[in-house]
Image (tube, grey):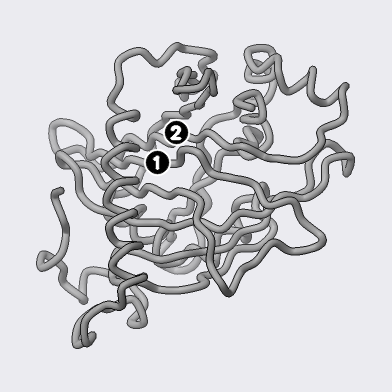
Amino acid sequence: MESPAGSDDEGEMPYKKQRYSSKGKMGFSAQEREWREQGDKTLESGWAVMKRNDWCLEDTSSIGDTVQSLTLAGSRKAYRITGWINASPRKICEELFYNSEEIPKWNLSVRSCHVVEIVDEFTDIGHHVASDGGAGLIKTRDFVTLRRWAVKEGSYVIASSSVSHPQMPPLPNFVRGEILLSVMSLTASEGGEPGAVFSWALATDLKGWIPGKLWARFQTFEQEAKVSISGIGIIEKGRRETEKYITSGLDLHYISIAAL
């Protein structure tokens, strides 16, 4: 694996939180070593799926953002959205990973998000609650995920998969969903121009009962994509005009129920 470890300059990482730093840490527990290993495997497998050449185009927005689909093992489907973001790949990666608890402020598909445990500088375990779907007819889903990031073939890659954690047992008011695949890649533009190509591939198992009418609706993804995709938006905040990133209108948590 290509790792960013050792190449990092604290002064160049404005969003990095000191609590993530692994410097001076006295080794890892057996559980932490297991999570690090699982994170590596998730990155490798997710990156392999992202690079596959058999993704099928589902729709293209007016500004060129695309939605593609791919059938995974077990006939489950994954969806990938790709677009252009006017910011550096590293900056986006840092924002998405180290400031993940801020995601609900700009991503309307996420109700809450918090870090359960930091494993090392590039690995954590988080809990997030998806916003209500189906006009309240679908019970709210929550997810506990292991996340790890690294530089792969020149791209910044964040991958995650579902895990169990003793501090986050299933909660009575939510249905615990499963992330089958979640990988984001951020690749610098060719020719040294500013900006990055952002891709996000996702497949989920939302578990639980889904109303029949909504099930039929979610199964027709190609039609849904035509009306729901509006691409990748950029929110500028603060004096430094910090770019943040959303998939406006395309609620991947719920639209990907077609993968069930």
Q: Residues within 10 Å of mark 2 (few under 14, many from 20)?
A: many
**Residue occupied by mark 2:** 201
Residue 178 placed where, x, y %? Answer: 58, 45
Q: What is the spatial separation of the Cα atoms under label 1 and label 2, in whole angstroms?
A: 5 Å
From the viewer's perspective, tell me whether residue 161 is left or right of residue 37: right
Identity, as a three-letter code, of the amino acid under mark 2 = Ala
Numbered circle sitting on residue 214: none
Residue type, numbered disc 1: Val
Residue that numbered label 1 is attached to: 183
Secondary structure at numbered mark 1: strand
Decide if residue 75 is on the left or right side of residue 38. Answer: right
Is mark 1 in CB contact (under 8 Å) with mark 2?
A: yes
Report x, y in % for residue 205: 62, 37
Q: What residue is shown at x 19% (from left), y 88% (from top)?
A: 24
Identify the image quadrant of the C terminus.
top right
Q: Secondary structure at mark 2?
A: strand
